[in-house]
Image (cartoon, rainbow, N blue to C red):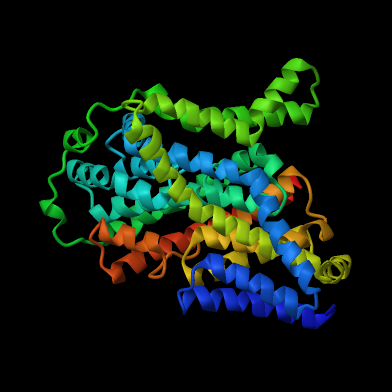
């Protein structure tokens, strides 16, 4: 089996292949990951049967405890999207913040809605609302666009049950710490949302979108597309009930309570159970229990989940191959030498994720691939336990923000549904996502020195 610096070169070439294949040749990340896994394993001298075994075990092992969680999360998001519950949540936030601060309202609306709903879909859902509020409040449409886009982006990459952070947690062995990851993700996302809001007010407000004066959307017209909106309680419950259950389970586990009640709370706090409870809570949002909703809507959620599941499984396979090499011994020596402190691991995670995000465009793919790459290093570098692993997820998420540009589908959703030119989008949206990524990393590093 290959050892020494040559092994690092093989791994570097494997990552380079993934970037080149996805960014230049447009090969789907799923196949890129699988081919890289086989290539790295064979080049590293792992026996061929063990390469196959590692890939199968890595793919299936990760699916065994994270697959249902991802599926449940996407189903919840789809029901919130189709039922109009996302707009109801937007309405509640708007009332709470006030129409005199429309950009802040859009940032907060985006941050809440994007916890279960993919940011691309959420932006499309809220685009008409954004335009009507911009017209009503007489603020530049570009400013409202960036406020919404950055609010959505922050929680999309940092806060479970969004699939990307869940997949990253699974890859690094932190799926049992989702309560901690949610809590820290919410803490980190606050300044990240804030910098997006500031960029929207200070920079994007100077950009004029051609034809924005002609927009005549009213809130009532936007709502009428969904008919009668669900109640506030019904709309928020599918998001917050799983988070509360996971949080309670984490507290019970941390305090080491015992007994039947503790066992029951731990059961409910298991991510799989908590998210399934959220799915059943979302059923109250269905306008009717029929084939269109129970099969059609849920089927659409399953289709959305399929790509994430395949990416996550392929990432797990790639990570399993890396673990099967002798790289752990090299990392152990590297860490013993004092160079690979926890802060270095965070910086490395951010850098790799940012490079992958910028090169191939997908935040989710950057989260999955980076988490698979750094997973073998964590234990050797002494990064273990709930808080340290949660901060690694944050560092990867921070990198997965920087930057959104022309090879990112979200970039085109934002530009096409707002009317921004590509040049203005670079100034308003791309630079905002860069600032968000940097702020997320700084906050994550600060939390490392405060909490670890």
Residue 443 percent coordinates (x, y): 60, 52
Name the residue nearer the viewer: 221 or 40: 40
Q: Is residue 330 left or right of residue 150?
A: right
Q: Which residue does the image show at 74% across and 80% down from the upper left?
A: 43
Residue 164 percent coordinates (x, y): 55, 52
Residue 447 visible in image: no
Name the residue nearer the viewer: 190 or 304: 304
Residue 448 percent coordinates (x, y): 71, 51
Against 408, residue 59 (above or below) is above
Write down the quadrant of residue 160 in the picture.
top right
Name the residue nearer the viewer: 289 or 189: 289
Q: Which residue does the image show at 76% across and 47% down from the upper left?
A: 452
Tell me the quadrant of the picture where the N terminus can be found: bottom right
Residue 224 percent coordinates (x, y): 19, 33
Q: Which residue does the image show at 70% across and 54% down from the upper left?
A: 172
In the picture as drawn, the residue positioned furthest to the top comes out as 260
Write down the quadrant of residue 379 in the picture.
bottom right
Residue 202 visible in image: yes
């Amino acid at each position: 089996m290959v050892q020494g610096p040559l092994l690092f070169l093989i791994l570097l070439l494997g990552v380079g292949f993934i970037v080149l294949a996805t960014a230049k040749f447009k090969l789907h990340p799923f196949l890129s990951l699988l081919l890289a896994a086989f290539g790295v394993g064979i080049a590293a001298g792992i026996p061929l049967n063990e390469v196959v075994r590692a890939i199968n075990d890595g793919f299936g092992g990760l699916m065994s405890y994270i697959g249902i969680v991802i599926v449940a999360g996407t189903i919840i998001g789809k029901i919130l999207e189709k039922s109009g519950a996302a707009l109801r949540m937007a309405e509640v936030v708007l009332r709470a913040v006030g129409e005199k601060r429309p950009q802040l309202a859009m940032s907060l609306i985006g941050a809440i809605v994007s916890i279960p709903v993919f940011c691309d879909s959420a932006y499309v859902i809220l685009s008409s609302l954004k335009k009507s509020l911009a017209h009503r409040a007489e603020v530049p449409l570009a400013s409202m666009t960036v406020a919404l886009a950055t609010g959505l982006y922050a929680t999309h990459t940092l806060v479970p049950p969004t699939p990307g952070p869940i997949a990253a947690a699974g890859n690094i062995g932190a799926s049992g710490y989702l309560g901690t990851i949610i809590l820290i993700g919410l803490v980190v996302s606050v300044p990240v949302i804030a910098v997006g809001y500031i960029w929207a007010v200070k920079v994007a407000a100077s950009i004029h979108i051609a034809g924005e004066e002609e927009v005549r959307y009213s809130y009532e017209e936007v709502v009428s597309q969904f008919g009668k909106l669900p109640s506030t309680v019904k709309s928020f419950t599918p998001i917050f009930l799983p988070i509360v259950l996971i949080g309670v389970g984490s507290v019970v586990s941390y305090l080491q309570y015992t007994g039947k009640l503790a066992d029951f709370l731990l059961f409910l706090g298991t991510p799989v159970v908590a998210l399934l409870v959220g799915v059943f809570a979302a059923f109250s949002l269905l306008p009717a229990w029929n084939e269109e909703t129970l099969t059609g809507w849920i089927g659409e959620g399953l289709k959305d989940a399929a790509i994430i599941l395949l990416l996550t499984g392929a990432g797990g396979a790639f990570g399993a191959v890396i673990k099967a090499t002798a790289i752990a011994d090299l990392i152990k020596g590297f860490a013993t030498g004092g160079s690979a402190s926890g802060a270095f691991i965070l910086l490395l995670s951010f850098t790799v994720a940012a490079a992958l995000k910028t090169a191939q465009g997908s935040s989710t793919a950057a989260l999955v691939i980076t988490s698979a790459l750094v997973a073998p290093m964590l234990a050797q570098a002494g990064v273990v336990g709930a808080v340290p692993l949660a901060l690694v997820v944050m560092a990867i998420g921070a990198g997965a923000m920087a930057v959104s540009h022309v090879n990112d589908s979200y970039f085109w959703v934002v530009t096409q549904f707002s009317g921004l030119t590509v040049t203005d989008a670079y100034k308003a949206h791309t630079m905002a996502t860069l600032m968000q990524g940097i702020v997320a990393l700084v906050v994550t590093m600060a939390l490392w020195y405060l909490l670890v």
